[in-house]
Image (tube, rainbow, N blue to C red):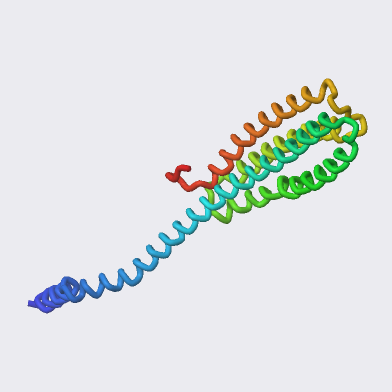
Amino acid sequence: MSNLPRRRSQKWYLSIWEHPLTLLLIGSALSCLLVPWISENSSRRRVLQEQRVSEARDILKQSVADDAQINAIVTSIEMFNKEAASNPKGYKAAQAEHERSFDTQYLEFDHHAWWWGHDLPVQSGLLELPSGSKDEIENLNQAYAKSLLGSTQQIEVLRKQFLGKDYVPRGLHNAEVLLAARKALNDLAVTRGAIISQLAGKFMPPGINW
């Protein structure tokens, strides 16, 4: 007989927990706690994904700007060579003008090309890229800079050939030097393109394609 009150108390206790109103209150409490947390984490992941995609696109954009600036410098030299060939006697004035143009174009290139990727390793941490991404991005940055250096060396060859004191309009080797430089620069641009694809790919969220 002494166990009867205890059994009744246990049944009452269980009945309280099984009551629909109690279950409703528990469900409401869990919803109040979990739904905001799930929503916040989902929003955070979405923002991170958008920022990563934006960073990847910016990497591609900056690389295209580098290639465009290099191409503009070379095209300007080619134009001068054609102009000088059409008027060998008056080429000195045109050469001085193109030399000033070259300096302006090269400074623009120099101010842009070597700096835009410096913060990418830091961005990899801020955007929570997988472990090891920072080192991989630094290595890709170095490979990109090496390719840029190769391009500047080709540009220097052209500058000396066409904007130097020894330039000869309609010179026998002018076309040969231009052709060789163009080929080398195109090869370097292809190399940079492969590097940039890898670099931008590091920032792309999993499951999202270009």
Residue occupying the point 67% across, 42% down? 68
Image position, residue 197 (x, y; %):
56, 39
Image position, residue 6 (x, y; %):
14, 76
Residue furthest left as drawn: 1
Residue occupying the point 65% across, 39% down? 139
Q: Nearer the viewer, residue 122 or 61?
A: 61
Is residue 117 depicted above or below 28 in this figure? above
Is residue 143 depicted above or below 37 in this figure? above
Quarter residue 196 falls in:
top right
Left or right of 86 on screen, residue 40: left
Residue occupying the point 21% across, 71% down? 23
Left or right of 42 on screen, residue 62: right
> In what quadrant of the picture does the N terminus appear?
bottom left
Residue occupying the point 63% across, 49% down? 120
Residue furthest right as drawn: 165
Image position, residue 189 (x, y; %):
65, 34
Q: Nearer the viewer, residue 140 or 186?
A: 186
Image position, residue 7 (x, y; %):
12, 74
